[in-house]
Amino acid sequence: MNDTIEKKCLSKGVKLTEQRRIIAKVISESKAAYGESDHPDVDELYSRVSKIDSKISIATVYRTVKLFEEAGILTKHDFRGGKARYEELNEGHHDHLIDIKSGEIIEFVDEEIENLQKKVAEKYGYELVDHKLELYGIKKNK
Amino acid sequence: MNDTIEKKCLSKGVKLTEQRRIIAKVISESKAAYGESDHPDVDELYSRVSKIDSKISIATVYRTVKLFEEAGILTKHDFRGGKARYEELNEGHHDHLIDIKSGEIIEFVDEEIENLQKKVAEKYGYELVDHKLELYGIKKNK
DNA sequence: GTGAATGCAAATTCTTTGCACGAGC
DNA sequence: GCTCGTGCAAAGAATTTGCATTCAC
């Protein structure tokens, strides 16, 4: 169901270059290779990309990531810690539960919360177009 | 019920200086003077503070804001837009609904959402210690 | 070919820091 | 006098940008 990033680019008129293809590949493989809690920042993407083609510059990674974000291919997260982190955007929206000790990130969906958010927005006369929910927690020792 | 920032400093052992007093004053007056949607960034605080005492440096504003944050007097928000924005922390916790066109910020509380968040965290074996919820919406024309 | 994409380095923006001076106890 | 806070300017980190070159179509 989820198209590859390459396909998404085609359908959105985003030109593909060799660099962009490599960056796309790295992003697509992110969770498969590094686990579900992988939400790399630009530095991290740059270093993964560099292993494939060391000539790609970090400026290109920044530009590509921004381009993909604008095309709706990626989402940017501003979790605590200063750097923007990215994740491929697929039709399944989800929120994040972040372990404040280990940094581990768990993705979850809760329909009920989603609906309540819509209701809150409506209550104030708004149409909800987006939202951000991050839970910060500590693992219970049992 | 809400102590002044000065009182909070005293009770938390934060030393008060003339500069900190002025910064505290500006923060306390923030919503009264600029409306509920006022969540100033450091630049904005600096410029308000400068009007009272033009000798205060922006470094002091940064240091004070961080100090107050660590003392639990302020919260820092990383809304979209890159700069950290601050708000006095009073016992009433709330989340934010942000108008993506005007930038206006509406504060709200929804107990039901809060409870569901706790439940979600627990479902994954976590104790919820903090969260961030931001809704982004467009005003309905009616 | 032509306009867009890239690499590089320099520039920006936000934030932090080193250091000497100054204020408060 | 000692400690800590402040101002200033310089340093850092993250991100963007100008420009000449290269690439995709």
Image: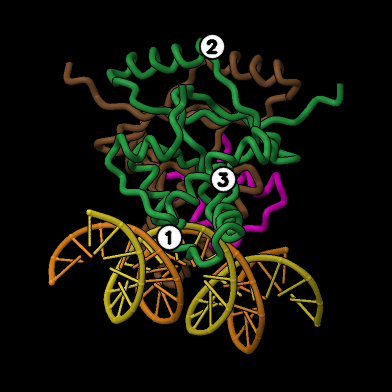
Chain colours: A brown, B green, C yellow, D orange
Determine whether the residue tagged by mark 1 lies in a helix, strand or loop: helix
Q: Is residue D20 above or below residue A80?
A: below
| Mark 3, residue position | A5
Q: Which of the chains bears the disc numbered 2?
A: A
Residue found at x 39% / y 12%: B119
Determine whether the residue tagged by mark 2 lies in a helix, strand or loop: helix
Residue found at x 47% / y 30%: B132
- Marks 2 & 3 on one chain: yes
Q: Is residue A11 magenta?
A: yes
Residue found at x 40% / y 70%: A54
| Mark 1, residue position | B60
Dot 2 alpha-carbon crowd within 10 angstroms: few under 14, some 14 to 19, many 20 or more: few
Q: Of discs 1 and 3, which sits in the foreground?
A: 1
Residue found at x 45% / y 49%: B21
Q: Is residue A4 above or below residue B141?
A: below
**Split into 4 quadrants, where in the image is the N terminus of chain A?**
top right
Calculate the distance from the C-alpha at mark 2 to the C-alpha at mark 1: 44 Å
Dot 1 alpha-carbon crowd within 10 angstroms: few under 14, some 14 to 19, many 20 or more: some
The foreground one among A115 and B84 is B84
Residue A112 is labelled as 2
The foreground one among C21 and C16 is C21
**Residue A68 seen in the current view:** yes
- Residues in magenta, as a range: A1-29
Q: Is residue A44 left or right of residue B36?
A: left
| SS assignment for the magenta stretch, majority | helix
Dot 3 alpha-carbon crowd within 10 angstroms: few under 14, some 14 to 19, many 20 or more: many
Q: Position of residue B59 (x, y in %)?
A: 44, 63
The foreground one among A26 and A1 is A26
Q: Position of residue A7 (x, y in %)?
A: 62, 44
Query: Looking at the picture, which amino acid does disc 3 mark?
Result: Ile
